[in-house]
Image: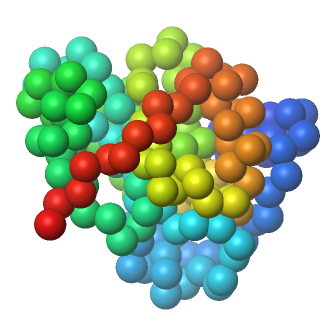
Amino acid sequence: MEHALYRLLDEQRIPYQRFEHPPVYTCEEAARLIPDLPGAECKNLFLCDAKGRRHFLVAVPANAGVDIKALGETLEAKGLRFASPERLKKYLGLEPGSVTLLAAVNDRDHQVEVVVDDALWAREAILCHPLVNTATLSVPVEGLARLLAHTGHAPRVIAVPRRD
């Protein structure tokens, strides 16, 4: 799975820098173990609506607290909540701790909507797991945009509501 992602990035001529590290499960662990790579650290949330009909992959700056209720209103998704690990596996082929914008490559049936915070999208590059939490890639935003368009997941770029 990870190797197929690297092949796709290379085929699409999307540059990236790769750094391997021990498994990380939180932004705090990542900040401690990953050197200063060029790019914005981000937090990725996999959410679904109350009925489990709509699924969202949401990326925000690592230090952002997300107001999930307000985000649900913005996305017109009632009862927005964290999706289960089973849904994460089913829709994105991931284990908890490995959620990443790059997982859109695994959603071949286009069941997941990609949402990116505008402050994050304004950065030059974003740090992303390559479908596993034992490595981090620095990928230019322009390259991410091309990859997401290639997979049919053009992101909805919005000011994700913050929690105070």
Residue visible at 35% across and 32% down?
56
Q: Which quadrant of the figure has residue 34?
A: bottom right
Q: In this view, does 58 lie above or below 128?
A: above
Q: Where is residue 97 in the image (x, y as percent from the top left)?
A: 41, 58
Asked whether residue 127 is in view, the answer is yes
As drawn, is 14 to the left or to the right of 125?
right
Of 73 and 48, nearer the camera is: 73
Residue visible at 68% across and 37% down?
145
Residue visible at 72% across and 55% down?
139
Q: Which quadrant of the figure has residue 6?
A: top right
Q: Which quadrant of the figure has residue 153?
A: top right
Quadrant of the snapshot with the N terminus: top right
Residue visible at 51% across and 56% down?
120
Asked whether residue 132 is in view, the answer is no
Q: Is residue 60 above or below residue 39?
A: above
Of 56 and 96, nearer the camera is: 56
Q: Where is residue 134 in the image (x, y as percent from the top left)?
A: 58, 66
Q: Position of residue 35 (x, y in %)?
A: 65, 84
As drawn, is 162 to the left or to the right of 25?
left
Of 118 and 15, nearer the camera is: 118
